Structure formats: C-alpha cells, structure tokens
Amino acid sequence: MNSKASFVVLLSLIFLNILAKDKKPFIPNCSDIHEGKVFVSQTETTNMMYHEYLYYQKSSLTENEFNALLPDTLVWRSKNQYNEAYVEYYFRHPAYRDYPIVGLTKSQAQLFCDWLSIVLTAENRKREDSDVDSVLVRLPTQSEWIFAAQGGNEYYEYPWEGHDLRMGEGKFQGMIRANFVRGKGDYMGVAGSLNDNADVTAPAKSYWPNDFGLYNCAGNVSEMVADKEVAMGGSWFSSGYDIRVRSEIPFTKPSSKVGFRYLVEVKRKKPTSKVTELKFNSKWMKQNFTVLGDTLHVQKFEVSNLLYNQFLRETNHKIQDTTLWNNQFPYSNYHTNNYRWHSDFENFPAVGMSRADAMAFCEWMKVKLVPVLGNKIEVFIPYEKEWMDAARGGLDLSPYPWGGPYIRNSKGVLLANHRYIAESYTTRNKEGEWQVNFPEGRHEMFGADFDGFMATAPCDTYHPNGFGLYNVAGNVKEMVGEKGMTKGGGWKSDYMFLDINSREEWNEKPAADVGFRVFVVVR
C-alpha cells in the first residue's frame, strides 16, 4: 500500500469508529464540551488528517487551486539553525503523520474545517446510530478555546490544576507535562524520560490530556482562534510561563510554531419517525388543567411545543420565526434549528407567537374541547387580574407563587428559571447607580450555572404553586389580555419580574421568551 492510500485508510478508520448502542452524534476524535451539542478535537490537527483532506480535494481542483492549499514548508527554514530536514520531510514523510500540521494560514485552516463539515455531515446522515443531520466544523473563538483548554475549570492557569510543569506524584512523578523550552537554546532538554523528549513538535497525542480529554493545549504548537489574530497556549518554542492557557502570540502568517484544532457544532438533528398525537379527553384534561371553582379550568403548564405543533399540523397555521433564537446566548443557533419541532423539545414551552397566533390557538382548542366539556365553553388568554389570582395559588398576599419573599429554597436552590445575576457581579458606577459587570469571557446568561437552564426549561420543571400550576414565575413571560405587557417573567428576565405584581413591557412582537397558557370557562 502506498503512503497516500495509507493516509486514506488510517483516517477512514477514525471516521468508521465503533458503532454506538444508543443514537448520538458521530464526532470521532473529539470531546463533548457542551451538552452533546459542541465538540472539540482531542488533538491538534495532524499531518495525516491534512493529507486526507488534500487527497479528497485534488481531483476537483486545478493545479493552482490545489497548490494554494499546501502548507508553507519553508517556515522551518531559519538563519540560525539547519532545519532543511524539516523543510523536506516534516509534512511529507510518513514518520511525521501523527505530528501537528504547521505552516498554514487561518483561511487554509478554515477551508479544512469546511471540508470536514461536509464529511461529518454526510457520515452522520447515513449512519443509523446517529441522531444528527448536519454539523458545522470551524475554528474555535478565543473564549471557546480557553474554556476547552481549561477542561471546564474556570480558574485553571494551565490545562491541569496548579502551577507545576511536572507531574507532582504517582508513577509519573517528575515527568514534564508539556512540550516547551526549559531554557535558552534548550529545545529538547537533557536526554531522558524526565524531559519533554521533543526537539520541535511532539506527536499530537503526547503527554496527558486535560479534564475534557484534550491533548497539548499547552505547548507543542500554538493554536489559531477564529476571532483574533493570535494563537493560544504557547508552543515548542515557548517558555514554561508562556504555555499558560491564556498565553497569546501574534499570528498573521504561517509559522512552524502554529497549528490548529477544530470545533464541531451540531446544527440540526434528525427528525424522529413517530409524531405524537394528543387525544383530547377527560383524562388529558385532568392531567393538563386544574379546576378552580365550578367553572374555571386553568392550564397547569405553558402551552408546549407538542401541543402547539398539533395545532399547526391540523390548521396549517403559519409556523413561528425560529430565527428569533439566533445569537441569544452561546450556541443558541442550535435552538434555531431544532427547538420548534424536534421531539427533544416537545415538553418545552412554545415561543415566537404573536397575540393573533395565540388567539387562533384558543379557537382551535375550543373546537378540540367541546366534545369533552360541552358547547358552552370559552377558551381565552387571561386578563392580568385573572392571571394573578391563579398565579398566587391561594396565597393572597404572596409576592411569589411559592410564598416569599425569597427566590431560593432552604438549600439555596433557585425556585424559578430567570436571568440570575450573582451579587458579586453587581457594582456601582461613579454616579452611584447599580450596574452589572461581567468578567471577561462571561456571557450574560451565565446564570444558567445556577438555575440549570441557559434558556427555557421543560414545562413541568420546578415546583407547582398551590393550585398545581407550573412556571407561573419564570421560564417564559406569559401573554395576558391587556396589550403591551406580560406577566411572570421569563428566562431572560431579572428576578424582580418574578413577582406576581410585576409587569414587563412587551412590544407585541414574537420573542424567544414570550409564551402563554390558556384558561377555559364552562358556561
């Protein structure tokens, strides 16, 4: 087998990994860094992987187009060193196939990512054990790279805990953790296993991985990021101080010290084959409505995607604008592509409707409930007072559905899904006004660390109020009969809007944090 064919076979073995028992994304050689939706390659991109890419491209490109994809091997040439062997062999010889690719521009790296997007999308679509329809492969942003390199440990200075560049204990005690320069002119250290054992780069899967299973986030080669003209993490040419996670070097042209690793976002999931059809009968009414007095039925949950989608199917009513999710929070475009229709979200509140859409839903719901409750019924969006009476759950003076005046239980757990801001992130400006000051790289929706959800939560999350109603505080802001306002607060709302008495202005336009629940009166 010639060397070119061997590259094809070896990388194909990676892509044709062991079949999973349960359906899940097929993202080989990568670690999950965000809820099965975002993955990062475990190693720097290698010469072998780049050769595989070139092999696929060669047949469809002109000679000039193909040559434009090749790395610049002259980056190894130096006035002070004799590196001609690297110029000739580093990229071309099979002995270096597992070493990180260098000598690329950022645009060349992104073209590789574009190709890998096509390959992984096609592979996931044809695999029965994958639940993914399409992915996007790209360079990580600087904040994404730092998060991945720290292994999810926000305060790590290196990819490992502590400040020591050698293993502190165990059978590997004293061994160097990364490929870097120990002193002036010392690129390999004193010979032996207690040193980095590499003159320039080391194989991409060297040393020990971080808590995400990523190798060489410190040293070996600095790594490109998408949003800045820098490379991160230091290289084989860097000192121990300069291989920290946040270490930067300027990067504007190909270098023997800079490579890259890629990030994979799951864009769209495959649809499930079975569509759930709800049966509107007395059992369904009992599960989904609570009866107040003799005639009033109040929906226990916000109208869910499952319920609203049945309305859409049966009426051909226009669907919501899912682009409302775009750029709401990190990776919210996953919601853009999946939230409205996928079964994973069927028990989440429907959002993105106008008041007219909600009114049309009420008319449809009335038709569905007439056989259950009789002809003399009215299905409607409650007015503010009606909503407040139900939200209090029988606690006439309570500021919150659960009592109050607090938003945590006795164990410190938040009782509603909202935009939580830790007290340590609030400060006063020069005029004495309160404002929020987020640390660098922290998104404003970091409160998800505390309430458990970046955006909406399932409709039956948290505890119900005294009437058995869920999420009348938080999750999604709820429409009421009066125009221009919503009640209860939502996942983007500050804590003061969880108060039953509070009102939140609404411009009557569909939004990713506005939904509704219906009331039914039997006359």
Image (tube, rainbow, N blue to C red):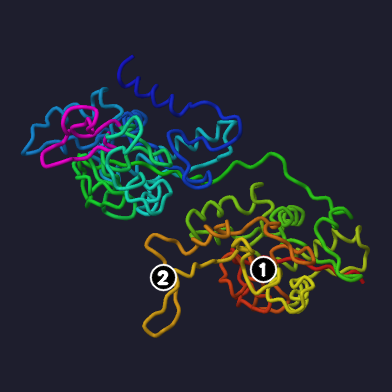
Q: Give the residue at x 59% y 31%.
A: 129
Quarter of the view holding residue 291 = bottom right
Q: Main secondary structure of the magenta part?
A: loop
User: Which circle's residue, 1 or 2, is located before the other in the chain?
Assistant: 2
Give the amino acid type for the residue marked by disc 2 in the picture.
Asn
Which part of the image, by quadrant, shows the N terminus? top left
Where 162 sits versus 496, above or below?
A: above
Task: Left or right? Give the position of 243 relative to 183.
Answer: right
Task: Left or right? Give the position of 128 relative to 87.
Answer: right
Where 419 sits versus 124, above or below?
A: below
Residue 188: in magenta span: yes
Residue bearing mark 2: 437
Where 506 sits versus 179, above or below?
A: below
User: Which numbered dot is residue 373?
Assistant: none
Give the amino acid type for the residue marked by disc 1 in the picture.
Ala
Q: Give the residue at x 49% y 59%.
A: 329
Where 28 sits versus 513, above or below?
A: above
Which part of the image, by quadrant, shows the C terminus? bottom right
- Out of 334 and 207, give the one closest to the viewer: 207
Residue bearing mark 1: 473
Task: Left or right? Give the position of 266 relative to 295.
Answer: left
Quarter of the view holding residue 311 = bottom right
Residue 216 location (% of width, % of height): 32, 39
- Out of 54 and 60, give the one closest to the viewer: 54
Residue 59 visible in the snapshot: no
Q: Which residues are magenta?
A: 175-203
Residue 234 visible in the snapshot: yes
Q: Is label 1 in a helix, a strand or a loop?
A: loop
